[in-house]
């Protein structure tokens, strides 16, 4: 190796062929930095037959690569509302979900709440509850066993497919009728979007039984967050439709006071409250 020093703190060097690989980045003609790692010297000790960086205690050693490890992709700054991105692993049930896709247990005055987290799956996909009920609606005005919707003959505690269920009903209705006015609850959900984020229209879903059961298990934490942001808590005296189907004639509904599910006391033509969820 031949080293020539010149004025102005610049180092000019020429490398001769040798028996081991010298850091590729060290072939630079002119170096204005004293960062050894930038030059490609990555070893912190001399393990034998190594070349030392001119400016520090880093070495380049035979048989070891000096290339930097590939950078890991950055975590998303927030969820994409309306689809699963895995961001929910950064959240917990009861957190406030904001319009920028971030969640927090705290009220952040500079951000706008859009929902409260009520379910997080093993795949780090979450569902968050709208900050308001939409009113009382029929589940449907016809008795049809939706072809792509699984029937649950016992409490639908294992059904977390809120949006898959909602899409199945909407797809069937549009295919058969050209709209989904026959399925009032799903029509209302389909057309819902909070004023703070109108672009989420069409992305909200009627909650499945397992998600409503998660609300039962975590009602205190969820209501605390709703109270902190002055939004409608889960009251103790209403029945909510789920998107979980029992049969062509009946669907499951949930009693917010006890968390009990029922399908017998009303057919799909019965009216119950609806409150949508959104995936994130």
Image: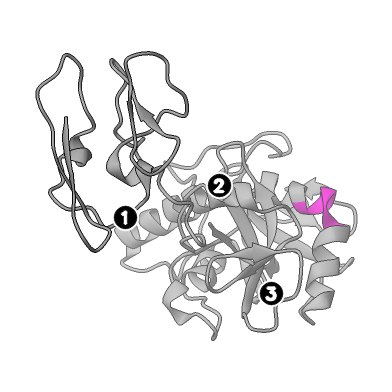
Residue 242 in picture, x, y percent from top left: 65, 54
Q: Quadrant of residue 113?
A: bottom right
Which residue is found at the position 62% from the left and 80% from the top? 111
Q: Would residue 166 be found to the left or right of residue 239 on screen?
A: left
Residue nearer the viewer, 29 or 132 = 29
Q: Quadrant of residue 231?
A: bottom right
In the rendered view, would you say 19 is above or below 188? above
Numbered tag placed on residue 33 in the rendering: 1
Locate the N terminus by quadrant: top left
Give the CA separation, mark 1 to mark 2. 45 Å
Earlier residue among tags 3 and 1? 1
What residue did someone put label 3 on?
131
Earlier residue among tags 3 and 2? 2
Give the CA separation, mark 3 to mark 1. 55 Å
Range of the magenta residues? 215-219
Residue 23 in picture, x, y percent from top left: 23, 32
What residue did someone put label 2 on?
125
Which one is in front in this view, the residue at disc 3 or the one at disc 1? 1
Earlier residue among tags 1 and 2? 1
Give the CA separation, mark 3 to mark 2. 20 Å
Which one is in front in this view, the residue at disc 3 or the one at disc 2? 2
């Amino acid at each position: 190796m031949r080293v020539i020093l010149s004025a102005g703190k610049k180092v000019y060097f020429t490398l001769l062929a040798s028996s081991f690989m010298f850091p590729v980045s060290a072939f630079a003609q002119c170096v204005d930095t004293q960062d050894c790692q930038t030059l490609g010297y990555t070893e912190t000790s001399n393990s034998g037959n190594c070349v030392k960086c001119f400016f520090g205690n880093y070495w380049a050693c035979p048989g070891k690569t000096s290339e930097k490890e590939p950078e890991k992709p950055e975590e998303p700054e927030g969820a994409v509302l309306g689809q699963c991105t895995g961001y929910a692993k950064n959240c917990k049930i009861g957190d406030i979900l904001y319009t920028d896709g971030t969640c927090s247990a705290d009220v952040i005055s500079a951000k706008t709440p859009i929902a409260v987290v009520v379910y997080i799956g093993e795949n780090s996909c979450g569902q968050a509850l709208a900050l308001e009920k939409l009113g009382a609606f029929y589940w449907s005005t016809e008795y049809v066993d939706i072809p792509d919707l699984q029937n649950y003959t016992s409490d639908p505690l294992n059904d977390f497919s809120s949006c898959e269920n909602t899409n199945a009903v909407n797809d069937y209705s549009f295919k058969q009728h050209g709209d989904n006015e026959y399925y009032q609850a799903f029509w209302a959900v389909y057309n819902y979007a909070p004023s703070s984020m109108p672009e989420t229209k069409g992305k909200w879903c009627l909650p499945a039984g397992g998600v409503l059961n998660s609300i039962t298990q975590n009602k205190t934490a969820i209501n605390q967050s709703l109270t902190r942001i002055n939004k409608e808590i889960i009251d103790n005296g209403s029945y909510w439709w789920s998107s979980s189907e029992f049969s062509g004639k009946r669907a499951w509904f949930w009693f917010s006071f006890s968390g009990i599910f029922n399908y017998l006391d009303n057919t799909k033509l019965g009216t119950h409250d609806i409150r949508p969820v959104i995936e994130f």
